[in-house]
Structure formats: structure tokens, C-alpha cells
Image: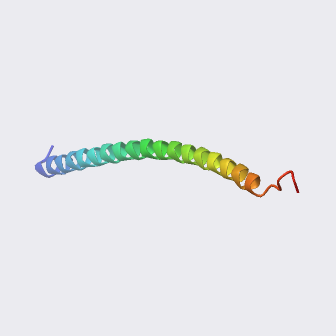
Amino acid sequence: MSKSQQTRLDSLELLYSEQDHTIQTLNDIVVQQSQEISRLNLQIEQIKLQLQSLKSESATEISSEFEIPPHY
């Protein structure tokens, strides 16, 4: 193998190594973001349940406030 071929091969190996590192880093970020999205989705569902509970409680309280007393 000539010196220019060896230099070219070394350059390609270095490039491959850098790209492999970049891909692994990006994969780690995607995994982390996926976990964060799952956690946030769970929080959203919990907040929705709390909001529904508050709506039903307040609707009951409001309707009882406007009921006509039995002596009318």
C-alpha cells in the first residue's frame, strides 16, 4: 500500500470514528428526550384528571348555590 493510500485510509478511519461518536451522542440525546417526553405526558394526564375533578367539584358547588330553597 502506498503512502497516499495509507494516508487516505487513516483519514477515512478517523472520519468514521468521529461519525460513530456523533451518532452515539445523538442516540443518547434521543433516548433522554424520549424519557422526558414520556414523563411530561404522564404529568399532563395527571393534570387533566385533577382539572376534571376540580370542574366536577365546582359544578356541583355552583349548582347547589343557585338551587331554590324548598320554602319558595
Residue 6: x and y in percent read 15, 46
In the drawing, does residue 28 fall left or right of residue 10?
right
- Residue at 87%, 53% (x, y): give it: 71
Residue extending farthest front:
71
* Quadrant of the frame with the C terminus: bottom right
* Residue in front for this viewpoint, 55 or 9: 55
Residue 36: x and y in percent read 42, 45
In the drawing, does residue 61 fall left or right of residue 3?
right
* Quadrant of the frame with the N terminus: top left
* Residue in front for this viewpoint, 21 or 4: 21
In the drawing, does residue 17 fall left or right of residue 43?
left
Count of numbered circles in the view:
0
Residue 29: x and y in percent read 35, 47
Question: Residue 65 appears in which quarter of the rendering?
Answer: bottom right
Looking at the picture, the colour scheme in use is: rainbow
* Residue in front for this viewpoint, 16 or 29: 29
- Residue at 29%, 48% (x, y): give it: 22
Residue extending farthest left:
3
- Residue at 65%, 48% (x, y): give it: 52
